[in-house]
């Protein structure tokens, strides 16, 4: 085993994928530095078998189990009148859930707490990367003036990745669905138990025509809601929250009162614009030495297959294992670059399969198949 293999690795972005990567490498005595522009927490994730394997690889499996919610697997599909077309309830003794739910903020905290001291640099917004002449290295520049030279830069910086252009000219495309993310605080939810009962312990999806609502119960009792609808303009929602909520409600005229109430009771100061973008199914590129991608930066897909978080953390695990394998076999930087190229091919193939499913479900929405059509797809997927 090589004892001199010490590549300088920079990970851009502190979402689940970047955090899994830095943790798995650290557990195998390979140092990496993760640069995060801020420390905001958001959303949540369902982790299936591939995601759970990443939690084990990152050394946080027991903590993950303590904080995940098997009952969060409950899923409903309804129409705008509240008719239920699909309802999955996990068994009471669900001791080995296939897709336990965990709040993304909790998942991120678990991974942050597990990371070695000094391995994460907050307040470092990535600006640019310049090839170092005569090498496969990159000089990275950050908004705060920090500069560093690395052997490998990994873009884990999400949909609007600034690292992606280093390896790919492909741009994300607008899907035709736009909308907002809002949330109802735990105390408001506690005052309206009838609304929580409508959603259940996990997620309720409501579909009518090209309009879609996803309501999710978080571990702390908060209700997170996404409202998407078709528009040729991704920025049609007013930027002022005071105007955005009435605008969103106008898109859901005629929907069941309790569904509209979820929007009305949401925090008016926490309205986030969420147009949906995606990369082409099967996004790939000619490998470029010293740079690669992971997560949404690599394979951005819509949330309509529930696999985005799974693929992201699984891909991070695969990249880490490739790098670890180089060290174990006594390789150096050239071998690491070849291993990264192999990672891109292998993960790209798996991600393509999941992206195809999510695009299929997106088209079901855009083609107005409705709750009944989507419910049938869920049944087939469960078989």
Image (cartoon, rainbow, N blue to C red):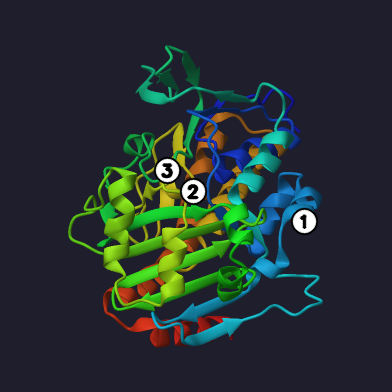
Q: From the image, tell me which residue sits under label 2.
A: 295
- Residue 362 quadrant: bottom left
First in residue order: circle 2 vs circle 3? 3
The spot of residue 251 in percent (x, y) is 27, 66
First in residue order: circle 1 vs circle 2? 1
- Residue 5 quadrant: top right
Q: At 41% from the left edge and 48% from the top edge, which residue is drawn?
A: 268
- Residue 161 quadrant: top left
Q: At 39% from the left edge and 74% from the top edge, which residue is drawn?
A: 361
- Distance (Cα) linking label 1 and label 2: 22 Å
User: Is label 1 or label 2 in front?
Assistant: 1
Q: Secondary structure at mark 1?
A: helix
Work out whether residue 127 can be spotted: yes
Viewer-proximal residue among 377 and 131: 377
Q: From the image, tell me which residue sits under label 3.
A: 269
The spot of residue 220 in percent (x, y) is 67, 53
First in residue order: circle 3 vs circle 1? 1
Q: From the image, tell me which residue sits under label 1.
A: 65
Q: Secondary structure at mark 3?
A: loop
Viewer-proximal residue among 77 and 341: 77
Q: Look at the numbered discs 2 and 3 and tell me whether their residues touch, using CB distance below 8 Å.
A: no
- Is the residue marked by circle 1 packed among few (<14), some (14-19), or many (20+) residues within 10 Å? some
Up the image or down, 100 lies above or below 10; here it is below
What is the quadrant of the C terminus in the image? Answer: bottom right
User: Is label 3 or label 1 in front?
Assistant: 3
The spot of residue 91 in percent (x, y) is 75, 80
Farthest residue to the left: give it: 232
User: Is label 2 or label 3 in front?
Assistant: 3
Work out whether residue 279 can be spotted: no
The spot of residue 134 in percent (x, y) is 38, 18
């Amino acid at each position: 085993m090589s004892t001199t293999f010490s590549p300088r690795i920079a990970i851009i972005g502190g979402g689940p994928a970047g955090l899994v990567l830095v943790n798995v490498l650290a557990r195998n005595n390979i140092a990496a530095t993760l640069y995060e522009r801020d420390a905001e927490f958001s959303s949540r994730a369902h982790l299936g078998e591939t995601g759970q394997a990443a939690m084990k690889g990152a050394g946080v499996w027991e903590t993950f189990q303590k904080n995940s919610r098997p009952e969060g697997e409950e899923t409903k599909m309804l129409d705008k009148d509240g008719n239920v077309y699909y309802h999955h309830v996990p068994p009471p003794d669900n001791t080995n859930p296939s897709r336990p739910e965990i709040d993304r903020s909790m998942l991120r905290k678990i991974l942050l707490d597990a990371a070695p001291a000094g391995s994460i640099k907050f307040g470092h917004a990535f600006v640019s990367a310049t090839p170092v002449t005569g090498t496969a290295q990159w000089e990275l520049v950050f908004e705060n003036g920090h500069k560093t030279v690395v052997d490998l830069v990994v873009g884990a910086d999400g949909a609007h990745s600034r690292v992606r252009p280093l390896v790919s000219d492909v741009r994300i495309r607008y899907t035709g669905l736009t909308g907002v993310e809002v949330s109802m605080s735990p105390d408001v939810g506690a005052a309206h138990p009838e609304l929580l009962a409508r959603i259940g312990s996990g997620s309720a999806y409501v579909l009518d025509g090209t309009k879609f609502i996803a309501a999710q119960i978080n571990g702390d009792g908060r209700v997170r809601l996404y409202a998407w609808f078709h528009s040729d303009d991704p920025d049609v929602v007013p930027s002022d929250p005071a105007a955005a909520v009435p605008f969103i409600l106008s898109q859901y005229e005629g929907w069941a009162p309790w569904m509209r109430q979820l929007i009305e009771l949401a925090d008016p100061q926490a309205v986030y614009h969420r147009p949906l973008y995606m990369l082409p199914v099967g996004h790939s590129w000619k490998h470029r030495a010293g740079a690669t991608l992971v997560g949404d930066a690599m394979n951005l897909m819509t949330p309509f297959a529930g696999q985005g978080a799974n693929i992201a953390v699984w891909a991070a695990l695969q990249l880490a294992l490739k790098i670890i394998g180089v060290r174990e076999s006594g390789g150096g930087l050239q071998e690491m670059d070849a291993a990264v190229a192999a990672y891109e091919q292998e993960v790209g193939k798996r991600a393509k399969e999941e992206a195809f499913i999510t695009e299929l479900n997106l088209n079901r929405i855009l083609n107005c198949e409705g709750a009944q059509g989507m419910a049938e797809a869920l049944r087939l997927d469960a078989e």
